[in-house]
Image: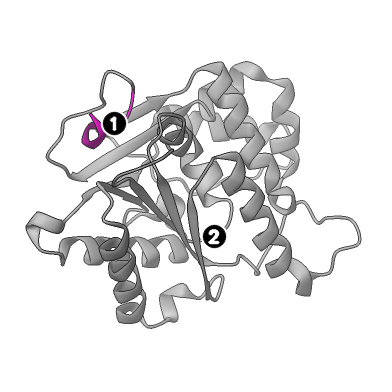
Amino acid sequence: METGPGLLVVMSHPDDESMGCGGLILRHTRAGIPVSLICATRGEAGWSGKPLGAKKEDLAQIRTGELEEAAATLAIGGVELWDYPDGGVDRCDRQEITQRIWEQITKLRPKAVVGWGPDGGYGHPDHIAVGACTDIAVTSMAEGDRPALYHLAIDQQVADFYKEAFRLSGDGQQLPLVVQDRFDVVFDLDPDEVMMKLRAIDCHRSQLEEWRIAIRNHPRLMQQGYGHEPYLTISSRATGLTANGLLGEFS
C-alpha cells in the first residue's frame, strides 16, 4: 500500500505523462512511491492515430479515456484533469492556473514535483505556460513546505532518437527540439521498464504517429529513446539518484 508524501507530475496534455516521463513515473510507482498527475488540458486540438469512426468533436472524450488507461498502466494514484483549451493555455489566466497547482501541492505535500521547463521541450506554448505556472507555484511556497523541482530535458541522445525514429515513417517530420548541454538526473530504463512504458504510450491510441507503431520492430531504437529520460534539477536538497534509481528525495 502506497503511503506518505510522493511525487507530483504536472503536464499539459494527455500523453505527456507517458511519452515524456513514463519511465520516471513507473520507476517510482513500482517502488511504492505514490505518484499524482495534473493534466491541464484534455488535448482536444489534434490527433495522429485518428481512431476508426471517431469524430474530431469526440477527441476530448477519447483522450480522457486514453489518459485513464495510461494512468492505470503506470499505477498513477490520482489524476487531476482540467479543461484549459488545448493550444491556448498561454492565453488563459496564469494566476488561476498557478493557484490551482499551488493548492494541489499544498494538499498532496509531495517530496518532488516534475514539470516542463521554459523551453517546453520543443517550444510548445502549452508546455511553456504550464511549466512556468508550476515553477511559480513551487517557488512561492514557504521554504519548509517547498518540494524539490525537476524539469523534463532533452539531451543529444534523445534528439538523435527522434531524428532516426521519424525516418521510420518516411515523412521527413521533425520537431524543433531544444537540446540541453547539461542535465542533472538521467533515468536509464531496463528492457522490462521500456516495455511497460510502451504499454502506457500505446494507451494513447489517438496520438500514435506511424513511427510510434513502426518503432516496435526496432528494440535498439526504443531502448535509446524510450529507455532514456534526462531531467534538470531546479531545486533539491538531495543529490542525483538513490541506489534504487529513484529521485534523491526518496532515499
The region drawn magenta spans 245-251
From the viewer's side, name the closer residue of 7 and 21.
Answer: 7
Q: Between 214 and 109, which is closer to the camera in this rendering?
A: 109
Can residue 182 be seen in this snapshot? no
For label 1, the SS is: strand
Q: Which amino acid type is shown beneath numbered disc 2?
A: His
Instruction: Indicate whether residue 196 is drawn in magenta.
Output: no
Is 250 or 224 nearer to us in this picture?
250
The reply, left or right, for residue 141 in relation to residue 61 is: left
Q: Residue furthest front?
A: 1
- Can residue 189 be seen from the camera position used here? yes
SS under mark 2: loop
Taking the image as shown, residue 143 lies to the left or right of residue 224, namely left
- Dot 1, how many residues are within 10 Å of its Cα: few (below 14), some (14-19), or many (20+)? many
Quadrant occupied by the C terminus: top left
Three-letter residue code for mark 1: Val
Q: Position of residue 124 (x, y in %)?
A: 47, 60
User: Residue 92, image x and y in percent?
Assistant: 42, 81
86 to 191, vertically: above or below:
below
For the residues labelled 1 and 2, the Cα–Cα distance comes to: 23 Å
- The residue identified by callout 2 is 13
Q: What's the residue at 49%, 43% (across, down)? A: 20
Query: Residue at the spot x=52%, y=51% of the render?
Result: 16
The image shows residue 242 at horizontal and vertical percentages of: 25, 24
Residue 101, percent from left and from top: 33, 67
The picture quadrant where one finds residue 66 is bottom right
Judge whether 33 appears above or below 97 on screen. Answer: above
Tell me whether the residue at label 1 lies in contact with that at label 2, contact meaning CB atoms closer than 8 angstroms. no
> Image point 77% across, 75% down: which residue?
57
Q: Which residue is identified by label 1?
A: 185
Residue at the spot x=26%, y=56% of the render?
109
Compared across the picture, whether 13 is left or right of 38 comes to right
